[in-house]
Amino acid sequence: MSFGQQLIDWRRELHQHPELSLQEFETTRRIRHWLENAGLKLLPLNLPTGVVAEVGRGEKVIALRADIDALPIEEKVDVPFASRNAGVMHACGHDIHSSVMLGAALLLKQKESQLAGRVRILFQPAEESFGGAKRLISAGALDNVRAIFGMHNEPGLPVGSFATRGGAFYANVDRFSLTVSGKGAHAARPHEGNDAILLASQLVVALQSIASRNVNTLESVVLSVTRIQGGNTWNVLPEQVELEGTLRTHRQTVRDNVTKRVNDIAAGLAQAFNAQIDVRWFAGPTALVNDDSWATFARDVADGHGYQTQEADLHMGGEDFAVYLQQIPGAFVSIGSHSEYGLHHPAFNPDEALIEQAARYFALLAEKALLQP
Ligand code: NI
């Protein structure tokens, strides 16, 4: 079997058996098995799910990272290797990323004696739920690593294309929840209550003024209210309304400013309407910030490898890889996977043709990165 076909077969096997964040036990078992069969050394890190392999010897260490978890989505793709786990799907292509880094590991193993150091390959659990990177770091996966590289497939780009950028790339992800507490009443006698639905509606509209009126238009910001719940019948004004949403930014000053405006607007409206609004924030991953020189290096290697390269646009999504880049330099890159339906869509169907080229690219990238002073 050709090398490329082997990687596609592995991808399909992972695709058939997707597992949610921190439940990647079978995925871990499979990846371990394939790596061990290829003679790769696995690091004895204490990880319930996820695997870290290493090739080469010496002081210098370069890391490559794949993510291995899937999403709670029912697959709507008619292929023989469709998900066999009901309600779970590799709808973000982490099966692709895993097969790419498996391929890179095998290629590096073949030239182990020529490597100018060690390459550590991280198969990270829990990217979707954010937190897997932190677990790997706590287990020691980044110890002595000089630089780390990772990829996400990009369904909007054709196979054979590559994009990255120096500096901020993926966004800071924050979740917020708002509880509006008024006073319930008969719907026909609203003056006896304090209408939480009216106040919640004012709140949604007021929050939308932040991006347009409090943030420099040249900065990136998204504030979305994504859930609003209150009341359970037509003739009663409810006591409480709950709202939930997300804030995405790239710059910390913008993040701080918008957070403060949300809090201030909630407090001000609560006072104006003589009600109570509680705001709670849950911080997700921080912005993914590529090292300028490693991003340029990764793009140069991609140019030499036959990719059509371009400067990546800013991305409003979050990516747990950001956590590694807070500790050590490196670069995250996008590789074209051409799918009609995008990431996290039940009909997402990336083109497997990207796998072999990307595997060869990451092996080359790690090999060349070890030669950097
Ligand atoms: Ni993903």
Image (cartoon, helix red, strand yellow):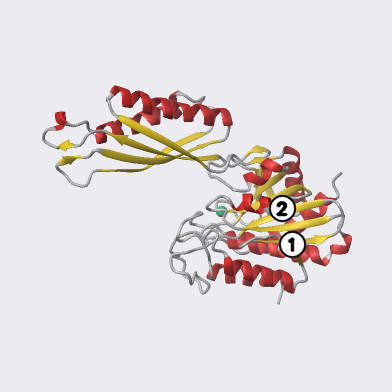
Question: 193 or 160, which is in the foreground?
Answer: 193
Name the residue rendered at 56%, 42% in the picture.
Answer: 315
| Residue in the image at 50% along x and 54% along y | 342
- From this viewpoint, is residue 373 visible? yes
Visible residue check, residue 8: no
State the image coordinates of residue 45 (x, y, percent, origin top left): 70, 60
Q: Of the residues shown, which amino acid type is indicated by label 1?
A: Leu
Using the image as rendered, state which of residue 221 and residue 348 is in the foreground.
221
For label 1, the residue is: 43
- Is the residue 370 above or below the residue 242 in the image? below
Q: Earlier in the sequence, mark 2 or mark 1?
A: 1
Q: With 103 as the anchor, is 91 left or right in this view?
A: left
- From the viewer's perspective, is residue 315 above or below residue 72? above
Q: Considering the numbered disc 1 on the image, is that residue within a helix, a strand or a loop? A: loop
Location of residue 178 by image quarter: top left
Classify mark 1: residues with Cα within 10 Å, few (<14), some (14-19) or many (20+).
some
Q: Separation of disc 2 and disc 1 at Cα?
A: 10 Å
Quadrant (top left/top right/bottom left/bottom right) for the N terminus? bottom right
Nearer-the-camera pick, 258 or 292: 258
- Specify the quadrant that holds the C terminus: top right
Q: Residue at x 58, y 59 (%)?
A: 94
With respect to residue 150, does 230 lie above or below?
above
Tell me, for residue 295, which label it has, or none.
none
Given the image, on which type of amino acid does mark 2 rest?
Answer: Gly
Numbered circle sitting on residue 140? 2
Residue drawn 60% across the image and 60% down it? 68
Side (left or right) of 363 relative to 193: right
Q: Locate residue 172, reporting x and y percent.
A: 55, 39
Labels 2 & 1 near each other (Cβ < 8 A): yes
